[in-house]
């Protein structure tokens, strides 16, 4: 059974919470006591229908303000798939949460209010989905009930987005448009009887049909070492195993590997998982690798295939960055850079541009990047990092920046 | 749901969840100096122990199991706890809520709904201070409750163990930032993304042992608020609450005073899984402590609850 992670994004009032609530409701993912709690909460609000948005709007502050303020995770499953939704707010000031929620997603759901059409946030979300290389985007034109399920209205929204989509999309990204009504359950899991003109998949149908993940196993092999296992017991006296989660590609017993940054070579003697001996392991597998020879390897080192002459070691490089902190990014300041499990000091030598993701333009005259801004930077690290170009190998191309004093995660970068 | 759709939904355990949780366990061991695994004896913390075993095999689990004993636990839970510690060779640390009460740091609740659930927080924070734990691994899942749906995997708590929803660090991709200031600690939730069904399917596929109270058995119970409660010396009964024998099991394992039983004939795990799928009550619904108010969990979390 595989897992499909979805990020939802949308502006404050376009009905995102209702959409998710509807998806849960129609996939039988809500139990009786939760429905009862929903009924009484809906009644307290003076509503005569089930307010499905209350299922996901969790925090007290949200209930007071009636908006979603943080990333919430929601789960449902079908016989074939487990789905994890990262429900992220669409506020301008909470773009950092959207990036956070979307960072693990394979599908981005973008909501557009059928009455309002495309707004600034739509462009922002499309751009971010492209920057994060999310392989599938589903644009849900919601609240079709409020425009009398008018096909022309839907087509007009689609047309108005076409040039923006063409600008942001990358090769291999799938983009689809769906007319829906979350409030009345049109086209969520069941075909829209109110929109006979629409012949495509329902939202759930679209999610169930989406194929992914094979690409990861074929990406270059990368194994960041998390922890060295040395039991020093009678039975495992000389045992030395390297524990980690393969970030991309495939490793097999017998592969000749090299450890970066030292470059020392060895051969994989075994790939193990709780005593079980595996022949091979692929991206996403948490395993222990043992080698035929003693090599000096510690946490933060990476194993790659010895034949891989392209394996990167970066010390001075360019990246896109999304700033996540109230204190602006300032060049010259030292930060901690975490790439996977590897930590090193880094200095931003230059901010090269600030991107306007709505207008799709950039300005070069920049001296700082503020919260929620996206830009280009040049940075230098104390130790080399084994990161790939993000667009070519997303699972090994991102890093975070940590403020040395506040310990906060202040930025997320994507190697250019 | 009809029976055929229930069978369809059981599915398999998504193995990628285990890989992610093992990754988190290893990050805890690597990033912190004095981590601990908070062990309650429930199925979620038993799952954590298995994941920790797998993460470091053939090495031992490199941190202790810590149990905050309320004194109101089911005896079966305590027996199981001691067995598991022995079986895995892990170090076991037990601290008692009764000691916090005796020291005047916590005050026993009174009345019909009195429980020691909230008092645990006092003992937990004292234990963290005693051992200078900088990371505490817990079995919370985001699907349990609305406030937990927003919880991070590494959740930073201040000196007073408090959680601040607005101060949470963004978690991007699988990168976990465990850096903290002196006095702060981190709660770590390696099975954040598992659902109740995932946990049960995992226990089944791994053929794990669990405490006997999860399975159907005969027990003296009383009925209160439409639910069944285990009769015990710790339960403050009203005059009309007369114990009777019933065939029950427990869906969660908390204190005897605040964990309700469900009527069940499920003597094996497959039947439990089917029962969960057709259940009309979600898991935390069987715990009185969440029902006190809609925002109950969030308030307790701000005060340093697990």
Image (cartoon, coloured by chain):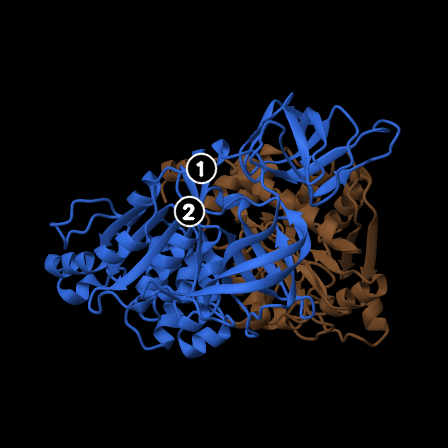
Q: CB atoms at circles 1 and 2 under 8 Å apart?
A: yes
Disc 1: which chain?
A
Question: Which residue corresponds to mark 2?
Answer: A106
Query: In the displayed structure, does residue A12 sit left or right of residue A59?
Result: left
Quarter of the image for residue A362 reads: bottom left
For the point 77% across and 42% down, the residue is: B84
Estimate the x, y position of residue A143 in percent, counting from the top left. 23, 64
Q: Nearer the viewer, residue A240 or B270?
A: A240
Q: Is residue B256 visible?
A: no
On residue A213, the disc is: 1
Estimate the x, y position of residue A30 in percent, counting from the top left. 41, 55
For the point 52% across and 49% down, the residue is: B195
Q: Nearer the viewer, residue A121 or B68?
A: A121
Rendered hue of chain B is brown
For the point 60% across and 72% down, the residue is: B164
Disc 2 crowd, CA 10 A, few/some/many (<14, 14-19, 20+): many
Q: Which chain is blue?
A: A
Estimate the x, y position of residue B281 in percent, counting from the top left. 48, 55
Disc 2: which chain?
A
Question: Is disc 2 placed on a helix, strand or loop?
Answer: loop
């Amino acid at each position: 059974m595989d897992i499909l992670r979805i990020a939802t994004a949308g502006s404050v009032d376009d009905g995102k919470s209702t959409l998710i609530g509807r998806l849960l409701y129609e996939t039988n993912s809500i139990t009786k006591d939760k429905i009862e709690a929903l009924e009484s909460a809906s009644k307290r609000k003076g509503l005569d229908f089930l307010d499905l948005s209350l299922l996901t709007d969790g925090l007290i502050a949200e209930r007071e303000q009636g908006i979603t303020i943080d990333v919430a995770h929601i789960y449902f499953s079908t016989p074939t798939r487990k789905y994890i939704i990262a429900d992220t707010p669409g506020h301008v000031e909470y773009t950092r949460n959207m990036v956070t929620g979307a960072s693990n997603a394979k599908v981005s759901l973008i909501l557009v209010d059928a009455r309002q059409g495309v707004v600034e946030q739509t462009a922002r979300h499309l751009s971010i989905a492209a920057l994060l290389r999310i392989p599938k985007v589903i644009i849900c034109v919601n609240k079709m009930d409020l425009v009398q399920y008018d096909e022309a209205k839907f087509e007009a929204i689609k047309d108005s987005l076409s040039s923006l989509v063409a600008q942001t999309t990358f090769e291999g990204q799938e983009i689809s448009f769906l007319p829906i009504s979350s409030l009345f359950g049109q086209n969520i899991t069941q075909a829209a009887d109110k929109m006979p003109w629409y012949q495509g998949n329902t939202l759930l149908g679209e999610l169930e049909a989406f194929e992914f993940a094979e690409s990861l196993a074929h990406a270059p092999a990368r194994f960041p070492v998390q922890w060295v296992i040395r039991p020093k017991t009678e039975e495992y006296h000389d045992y030395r195993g390297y524990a980690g989660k393969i970030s991309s590609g495939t490793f097999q017993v017998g592969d000749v590997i090299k450890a970066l940054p030292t470059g020392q070579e060895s051969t994989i003697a075994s790939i193990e998982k709780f005593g079980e001996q595996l022949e091979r392991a692929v991206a996403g597998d948490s395993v222990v690798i043992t080698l035929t020879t003693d090599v000096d390897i510690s946490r933060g080192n990476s194993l790659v295939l010895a034949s891989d002459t392209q394996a990167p070691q970066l010390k001075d490089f360019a990246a896109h960055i999304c700033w996540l902190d109230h204190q602006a990014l300032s060049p010259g300041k030292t930060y901690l850079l975490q790439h996977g499990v590897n930590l090193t000091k880094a200095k931003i030598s230059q901010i090269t541009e600030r991107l306007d993701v709505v207008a799709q333009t950039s300005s070069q005259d920049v001296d700082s990047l503020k919260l929620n801004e996206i830009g280009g930077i040049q940075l230098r690290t104390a130790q080399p990092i084994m990161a790939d170009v993000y667009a070519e190998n997303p699972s090994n191309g991102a890093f975070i920046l940590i403020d040395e004093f506040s310990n906060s995660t202040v930025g997320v970068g994507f190697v250019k | 749901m009809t029976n055929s759709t229930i069978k369809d939904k059981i599915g398999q355990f998504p193995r990628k969840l285990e890989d992610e949780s093992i990754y988190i366990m290893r990050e805890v061991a690597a990033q912190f100096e004095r981590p601990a695994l908070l062990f309650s004896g429930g199925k979620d913390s038993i799952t954590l122990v298995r994941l920790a075993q797998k993460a470091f095999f053939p090495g031992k689990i490199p941190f202790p199991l810590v149990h905050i004993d309320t004194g109101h636990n089911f005896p079966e839970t305590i027996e199981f706890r001691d067995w598991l510690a022995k079986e895995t060779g892990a170090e076991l640390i037990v601290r008692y809520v009764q000691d916090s009460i005796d020291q005047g740091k916590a005050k026993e609740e009174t009345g019909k709904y009195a429980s020691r659930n909230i008092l645990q927080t006092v003992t937990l924070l004292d234990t963290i201070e005693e051992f200078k734990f900088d990371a505490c691994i817990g079995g919370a899942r985001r699907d349990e409750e609305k406030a937990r749906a927003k919880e991070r995997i590494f959740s930073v708590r201040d000196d007073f163990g408090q959680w601040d929803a607005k101060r949470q660090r963004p978690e991007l991709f699988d990168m976990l930032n465990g850096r903290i200031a002196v006095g702060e600690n981190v709660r770590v939730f390696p099975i954040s993304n598992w659902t109740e069904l995932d946990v049960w399917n995992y226990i089944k596929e791994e053929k794990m042992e669990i405490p006997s109270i999860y399975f159907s058995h005969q027990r003296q119970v009383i009925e209160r608020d439409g639910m069944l409660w285990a009769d015990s010396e710790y339960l403050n009964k009203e005059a009309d609450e007369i114990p009777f024998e019933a065939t029950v099991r427990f869906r969660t394992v908390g204190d005897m005073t605040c964990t309700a039983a469900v009527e069940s004939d499920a003597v094996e795990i497959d039947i439990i899984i089917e029962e969960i799928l057709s259940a009309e009550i979600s898991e935390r619904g069987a715990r009185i402590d969440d029902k006190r108010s809609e925002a109950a969990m969030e308030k307790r979390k701000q005060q340093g609850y697990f």
